[in-house]
Image (cartoon, rainbow, N blue to C red):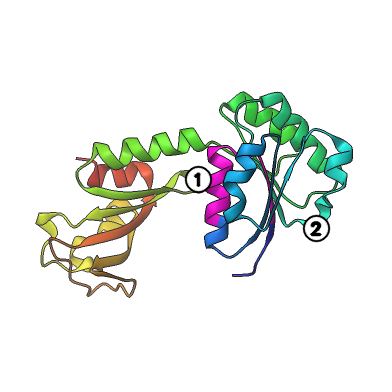
Amino acid sequence: MNMKNVLIIGAGRFGRYTAMKLHDLGHQTMVIDRNEERIDAILPYVSSASIGDATNASFMKSLGIRNFDLCIVAIGDDFLASLETTFLLSELGAKKVVSRATSASQEKFLLHNGATAVVFPEKELGSWTAIRYSSDNISNYIEMPEGFSIIEAAVPRAWDGKRVEDLDIRKKYHVNILGIRNGKLDMNISNDTVLRFGQSMLVLGKYDMIQKLFFL
């Protein structure tokens, strides 16, 4: 993985957790926020930080926006500021701008004013929580583009001792078993792979097909 230079605007919960994960991944991160206490709290996880107003053009120009591989607008409590910041980043030549939104209307405004992509942290976490905890079979869930999902699910008791080919789920349900976890993850899956009750599987497919198989 190549190290990236990332600018995060907003050091609230979303910005802080994003910065912490980027730190774990080895990226170089700068965070800006108007609130000094938020900046102090995030210092251990970033390469640099600055107190400032992201809607101020002079301040933003001083940061050298073109030098960042990614700019994340993590402002959550002031949509107008988020929109102005997104537009200003685009005007200053940002390579990629990912902005936070809480509604579809906000998403449209952000995309029309310079955002490369828009994320919905609350919506995505809400979906994950609902799916993860409403089914006894599901232990993890990742939503993918175009209606696809990856889930980690328990091998059903009825599948115990059967080969992947015997189940024929790719033909019947258009889903694929990517891996089997039995202590450690084994991604070397073939038609002859035997499934055992007590194991878990990584499964990729359209959400509605996965739902038919595992959301019982």
The amino acid at mark 2 is Asn
The quarter holding residue 204 reads bottom left
15 in magenta? yes
Q: Which residue occupies 67% across, 26% down? A: 79
The amino acid at mark 1 is Glu
Position of the C terminus, as image quadrant, is top left
Q: Nearer the viewer, residue 12 or 150?
A: 12
Residue 146: give its label. Answer: 1
Q: Badge 2: how crowded within 10 Å, few (<14), some, or many (20+)?
A: few
Q: Left or right: where does residue 116 sit relative to residue 104?
A: right
Q: Which residues are magenta?
A: 6-21
28 in magenta? no
Q: Which residue occupies 70% across, 44% down? A: 116
Q: Nearer the viewer, residue 14 or 180?
A: 14
Q: Nearer the viewer, residue 8 or 41?
A: 41
Q: Nearer the viewer, mark 1 or mark 2?
A: 2
Contact, CB < 8 Å: mark 1 with mark 2? no
Q: Position of residue 177 (x, y in %)?
A: 31, 62
**Residue on which disc 2 sits:** 67
Q: Which residue occupies 71% across, 40% down? A: 115
Q: Badge 1: how crowded within 10 Å, few (<14), some, or many (20+)?
A: few
Q: Position of residue 42 (x, y in %)?
A: 59, 48
The quarter holding residue 190 reads bottom left
Q: Position of residue 201 (x, y in %)?
A: 27, 60
Please tell me whether mark 2 sits on a helix, a strand or a loop. helix
Q: Which residue occupies 22% across, 75% down? A: 192
Q: Is residue 56 above or below residue 177?
A: above
Please tell me whether mark 1 sits on a helix, a strand or a loop. helix
Q: Position of residue 16 (x, y in %)?
A: 56, 45
The first of marks 1 and 2 along the sequence is 2
Residue 43: give its label. Answer: none
Gap in angstroms between the C-alphas marked 1 and 2: 32 Å
